[in-house]
Amino acid sequence: MAEIADSGGGHDKGGKKRPKKGSTKVDMTPLVDLAFLLLTFFVLTSTFSKPKVMSLVYPAKPKDIPEGEIPKVNNAVTFLLSDDRIFYYEGAFYPAGNGAGKPATELLETDFGSQGVRKLLTNLNRFVLEKKAGLDEERKRNPIEDSVYLRKVKEFKGDIQALKVLIKTDDKATCKNFIDLIDELKIADIGVIAPVDMMASELELVKAKTGK
């Protein structure tokens, strides 16, 4: 608070009375309180930016699987990245001469063109995309809360019919291809994405394709 202190008066040598002089003193305590109030207000009302991240699901270590037995894979596609090329196969991997008597897995190649990865993922993940499209139409007719909408979409992505994607890279894979593939998976609403190690038999097929 501001206050004026009285310094008192006096007389000059000539006998004239001097006027009283006042000194101004400002108390800053209320301003400090105001500063803390404003700081508290902005901290409580501000919205902090959240980092934009994409969750990746790392599969659990498989239990003891008899030698030669092929792990069961439900509605999955595996991408193999090497150098500047992208290979893939659907379902489980069957090496040549496997004990299940299945034909050996053949690698197919794709790219990031209009008829490449995006079209492939759209076809394979049609279950989730159609469910989400239906939910969007329903949302237009009867608005629902964002939390309810996101929960339902998450349920679609976690359904057994939803596509699961495994990503495997060798030491020649480029970071750009990996990031571009992750972007395509996000666009296609893939719910389960698992970066895993490439098996030796898969690496042999990749080397046969690339000639390296």
Image (cartoon, rainbow, N blue to C red):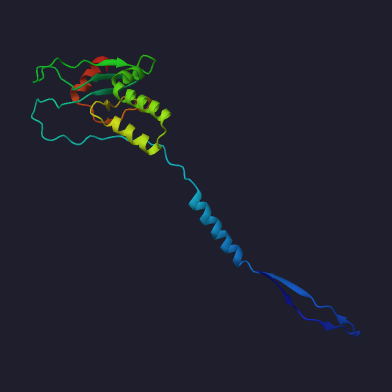
What quarter of the picture does the C terminus occupy? top left
**Which residue is nearer to you in this view: 30 or 177?**
30
The answer to whether residue 179 of the structure is visible from this angle is no
Name the side, left or right, on which 56 lies relative to 142.
left
Residue at the far front in the pictured view: 142
**Which residue is nearer to you in this view: 144 or 75?**
144
Task: Give the total of numbered labels.
Answer: 0
Where does the image place residue 198, in percent across and percent down from the top left? Answer: 23, 27
- Quadrant in which residue 197 is drawn: top left
**Which residue is nearer to you in this view: 99 or 121?**
121
| Vertical arrangement, residue 34 with respect to residue 169, above or below | below
> What residue sits 28% from the left and 20% below the top?
124
Where does the image place residue 33, in percent across and percent down from the top left? Answer: 56, 63
What quarter of the picture does the N terminus occupy? bottom right
Name the side, left or right, on which 106 lies relative to 156.
left
Name the side, left or right, on which 3 lies relative to 187.
right
**Which residue is nearer to you in this view: 86 or 38?**
38
| Vertical arrangement, residue 53 with respect to residue 105, above or below | below
- Quadrant in which residue 14 is drawn: bottom right
Where does the image place residue 21, in percent across and percent down from the top left? Answer: 79, 75
> What residue sits 23% from the left and 24% below the top?
75
The answer to whether residue 76 of the structure is visible from this angle is yes
- Quadrant in which residue 171 is drawn: top left
Where does the image place residue 202, in percent across and percent down from the top left? Answer: 21, 22
